[in-house]
């Protein structure tokens, strides 16, 4: 048995097809292949595929030529599909999965090898999630027997760290949708399976990790998995399904959009659109086909495309998307994916003054929390958020709202995942204000925070937002005024 390793996968946009089960032979689902990661205990991993109607399918899990378990099912007549749920398996591997179809005297056998069990995370969203390692400023860590906390900023990640005794693998699914000037092959129904896999589960290389803009592996997804693996020390599978310039409506099912009162059909304005934007198109093509997979959780980085498109509905459409994805993956995996699986997301970054025509980004940030200002909350249970407001990248060739420092974002996301998904006792959120008092006679603003804050003495300690007129919305007009430090020892704000 080899030492547990770190594995990740990548899902890119897909070629659509009307009926994935029609006129197909005996096969696994498109994303089930050699070197893959299946969800570990306490959940059971789902193995499924297509075959001949009425045939019997036996799925066997083996290790070192020893049979661990067998599951028997039959091919459904209406869909030509079959499915089994494996018993929970401890993290590690490698294993071999064998599927045998018997119909009369005909006997067909499929095998996939070097399969690991670990935690499987789905990464989705738009450009900030889709940006690749080659587009990021990566903090390179120098290695010795342990990580040395010395960071050197480089324009391109020209190295892939070596994890001794572990495995790093990737999955690249499908080619992009056929679209030109907003006219593309539309997904008219929820697809049952992915249409094409360009690069099956494999070990990462510079070719599949680091070349091309908005192609190949998501840097944020990859770094998030690396940080998780450093803590978990067992396999981590990552699947990235993202597309630049896409609104949340494209990733949402029709039922979740209806629940939020979103118009039944719609497109983004042509001057804003850079990716597929028809309602539910990416849900049908890039999320629904994955629903049978047993997942540990999801991370999400999206919202820029909604700054000037259905912005006022985002406080409903985002929580509705989370709830709908949770229900869909729970049902599709026969209850193996947790009903309220952990869902992490990135609060949108800041932007250069004048880079956008209005204050839409602050409003989207507020709506990302369902107007609570923090997560988890009553409308968004079991969620976690990574703040990126301090990571504005004024020199980013992709715009200041696309910070190239995805390492910091990934680190913050993994802290949230450790706390929410794995129950670690650690600080993963900044202090939240519990009480705000305006002491008018003293000209002071008294803030009481959820945890002590130590403020060191600098030229300016903080900045105070001031409204030019009474009644101005806090995210509207007004100026910034620096507040000089108090003289004396470091100030403790409670």
Image (cartoon, rainbow, N blue to C red):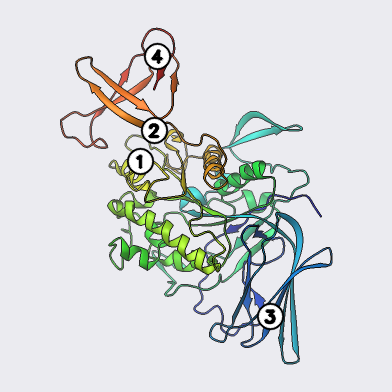
Looking at the image, tell me whether mark 3 or mark 1 is earlier in sequence order: 3
Badges 3 and 2: C-beta atoms under 8 Å apart?
no
Query: Image check: 315 left or right of 98?
Result: left
Q: Would you identify the image quadrant in which residue 228 lies?
A: top right
- Image depth: mark 4 or mark 2 in front: 2
Picture residue at 42% right of the left edge, 45% below the top? 376
Name the residue at the bottom extreme.
104
Residue located 38% across and 28% down the image? 449
The image quadrant where one finds the N terminus is bottom right
Which numbered disc, 3 or 4, marks the residue that appears first in the sequence? 3
Q: Position of residue 17 (x, y in %)?
A: 51, 76
Q: Nearer the viewer, residue 306 or 92?
A: 92
Tell me the element at label 1.
loop
List the residue tagged with mark 2.
Answer: 432
Q: CA distance from mark 3 to mark 4?
A: 72 Å
- The answer for how far apart the CA atoms under marks 3 and 2 are is 55 Å
User: How many marks overall?
Assistant: 4
Q: Nearer the viewer, residue 98 or 70?
A: 70
* Residue at the spot of label 3: 57
Q: Which residue is mark 1?
A: 373
Residue shown at the point (74%, 82%) measured from the top left: 108
Q: Quadrant of the C terminus?
A: top left
Look at mark 4 in the image and give the residue it sits on.
459
Q: Is residue 275 visible?
A: no
Q: Splitting the image into 4 quarters, where does residue 58 fall? A: bottom right
Residue found at the far right of this picture = 65
Q: CA distance from mark 4 to mark 2?
A: 24 Å
Disc 3 from disc 1: Cα separation: 50 Å
* Sequence-wise first label, 4 or 2: 2
């Amino acid at each position: 048995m080899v030492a547990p390793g770190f594995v990740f996968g990548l899902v890119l946009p897909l070629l659509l097809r009307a009926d994935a089960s029609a006129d197909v032979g005996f096969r696994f689902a498109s994303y089930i292949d050699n070197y893959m990661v299946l969800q570990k205990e306490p959940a059971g991993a789902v193995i499924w595929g297509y075959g001949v109607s009425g045939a019997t399918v036996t799925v066997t899990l083996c290790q070192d030529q020893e049979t661990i378990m067998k599951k028997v099912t039959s091919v459904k007549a209406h869909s030509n599909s079959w499915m089994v749920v494996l018993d929970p398996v401890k993290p590690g591997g490698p294993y071999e999965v064998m599927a045998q179809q018997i119909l009369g005297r005909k006997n067909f056998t499929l095998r996939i090898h070097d399969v690991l069990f670990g935690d499987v995370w789905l990464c989705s969203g738009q450009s900030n999630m889709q940006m690749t390692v080659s587009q990021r400023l990566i903090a390179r860590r120098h290695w010795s027997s342990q990580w040395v906390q010395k960071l050197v900023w480089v324009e391109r990640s020209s190295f892939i760290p070596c994890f001794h005794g572990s495995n790093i693998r990737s999955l690249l699914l499908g080619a992009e949708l056929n679209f030109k000037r907003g006219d593309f092959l539309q997904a008219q129904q929820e697809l049952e399976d992915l249409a094409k896999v360009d690069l099956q589960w494999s070990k990462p290389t510079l070719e599949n990790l680091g070349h091309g803009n908005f192609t190949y592996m998501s840097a944020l997804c990859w770094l998030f998995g690396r940080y998780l693996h450093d803590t978990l020390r067992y396999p981590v599978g990552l699947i990235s399904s993202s597309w630049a310039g896409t609104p949340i409506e494209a990733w949402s099912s029709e039922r979740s959009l209806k629940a939020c009162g979103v118009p039944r059909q719609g497109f983004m304005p042509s001057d804003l659109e850079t990716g597929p934007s028809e309602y539910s198109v990416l849900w049908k093509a890039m999320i629904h086909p994955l629903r049978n997979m047993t997942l540990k959780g999801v991370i999400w980085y999206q919202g820029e495309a909604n700054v000037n498109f259905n912005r006022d509905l985002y406080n409903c459409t985002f929580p509705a998307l989370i709830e709908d994805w949770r229900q869909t993956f729970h049902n599709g995996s026969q209850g193996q994916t947790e009903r309220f699986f952990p869902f992490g997301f990135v609060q949108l970054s800041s932007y250069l003054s004048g880079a956008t025509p209005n204050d839409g980004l602050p409003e989207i940030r507020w709506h990302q929390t369902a107007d609570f200002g923090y997560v988890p909350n009553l409308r968004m249970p079991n969620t976690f958020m990574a703040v990126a407001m301090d990571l504005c990248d004024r020199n980013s060739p992709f715009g200041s709202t696309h910070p190239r420092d995805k390492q910091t974002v990934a680190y913050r996301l993994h802290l949230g995942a450790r706390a929410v998904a794995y129950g670690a006792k650690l600080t993963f959120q900044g202090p939240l204000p519990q009480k705000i008092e305006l002491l008018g006679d003293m000209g002071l603003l008294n803030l009481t925070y959820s945890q002590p804050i130590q403020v060191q003495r600098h030229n300016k300690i903080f900045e105070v937002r001031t409204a030019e007129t009474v009644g101005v919305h806090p995210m509207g007009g007004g100026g910034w005024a620096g507040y000089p430090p108090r003289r004396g020892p470091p100030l403790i704000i409670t």
